[in-house]
């Protein structure tokens, strides 16, 4: 079944299993159908700007990220797509495609029928069954013995190094933004706050830095900030401490380390 002349579900399933396939644009009705019209029962994640749904195909599974208040976050959506189109690494969640759909919709506004644009902005990715690292940070061994903790730290470091080599700052690296595959291999995700630099650019001056408290470098609270790769390294350090100690955020002390 072809929806709006776009990619068919069968073609999508082939793409999910083809590691060399490039990200493509998808029609909104297809993603709507695959998520059972964005059923609450298929929600697997939720953030400040989006909800993530599990979409089950006949021969695979994908994760669909649907942004809300898209009129406010169009720049963020375009920035995220720009960064994701550039990355392909075993420790980065595989980006499969996006949807940028805008339709006119007649609605009542102060007693008058007016035409308003309804925007749909979605991204979709490989589905990782183990969820996020955040759920595994505990001081009991569980699934994370010392070998796996070492491999996990190494994987996150390699993924972040790859991003920096490609002039991309993540700027929201947290345990919640590191997903795990069936072998517990870590993969960095959520590039909503990321910045892509020009080839010879090493930093950018800004007055506003969003992110997650506890993983933001102290200089983020200055009035004027020069964003560099060091911001991600601070976040990485906090994550390494949590993986090693099994304690989150403010629970970590020097003695534990």
Image (cartoon, helix red, strand yellow):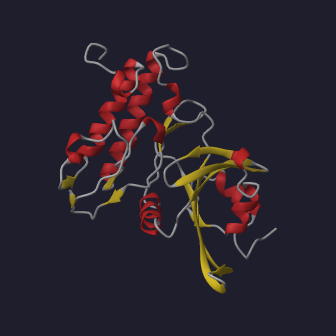
In the image shown, does 135 or 150 lie closer to the viewer? Answer: 135
Q: In the figure, residue 31 lies in which quadrant?
A: bottom right
Q: Is residue 70 above or below residue 19?
A: below
**Left or right of 222: which side holds 119?**
right
Q: Is residue 228 above or below residue 204?
A: above
Q: In the figure, residue 26 lies in which quadrant?
A: bottom right
Q: Residue at x 34, y 58 (%)?
A: 195
Residue 102 percent coordinates (x, y): 60, 76
**Left or right of 119: which side holds 204?**
left
Q: Residue at x 51, y 25 (%)?
A: 136
Residue 4 percent coordinates (x, y): 73, 76
In the image shown, does 141 or 1 lie closer to the viewer? Answer: 141
| Residue at the limit of the structure toward the front, as seen here | 111
In the image shown, does 166 or 114 lie closer to the viewer? Answer: 114
Q: Residue at x 44, y 16 (%)?
A: 146
Residue 81 percent coordinates (x, y): 47, 63
């Amino acid at each position: 079944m072809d929806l709006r002349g776009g990619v068919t579900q069968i073609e999508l399933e082939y793409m999910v299993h083809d590691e060399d396939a490039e990200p493509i644009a998808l029609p909104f009705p297809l993603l709507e159908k695959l998520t059972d019209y964005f059923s609450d029962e298929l929600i697997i994640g939720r953030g400040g700007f989006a909800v993530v749904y599990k979409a089950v195909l006949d021969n695979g599974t994908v994760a669909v990220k649907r942004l809300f208040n898209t009129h406010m976050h169009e720049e963020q959506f375009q920035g995220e797509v720009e960064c994701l189109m550039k990355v392909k690494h075993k420790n980065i969640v595989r980006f499969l495609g996006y949807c940028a759909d805008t339709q006119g919709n007649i609605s009542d506004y102060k007693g008058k029928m007016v035409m308003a644009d309804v925007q749909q902005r979605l991204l979709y990715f490989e589905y990782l069954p183990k969820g996020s690292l955040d759920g595994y940070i505990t001081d009991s061994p569980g699934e994370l013995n010392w070998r796996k903790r070492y491999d996990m730290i190494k994987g996150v470091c390699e993924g972040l190094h790859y991003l920096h080599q490609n002039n991309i700052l993540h700027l929201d690296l947290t345990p919640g933004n590191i997903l795990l595959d069936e072998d517990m291999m870590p993969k960095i995700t959520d590039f909503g706050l990321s910045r892509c630099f020009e080839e010879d650019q090493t930093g950018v001056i800004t007055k506003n830095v969003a992110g997650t408290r506890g993983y933001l470098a102290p200089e983020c609270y200055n009035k004027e900030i020069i964003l560099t790769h060091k911001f991600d390294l601070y976040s990485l350090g906090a994550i390494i401490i949590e993986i090693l100690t099994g304690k989150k955020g403010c629970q970590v002390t020097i003695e534990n380390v």
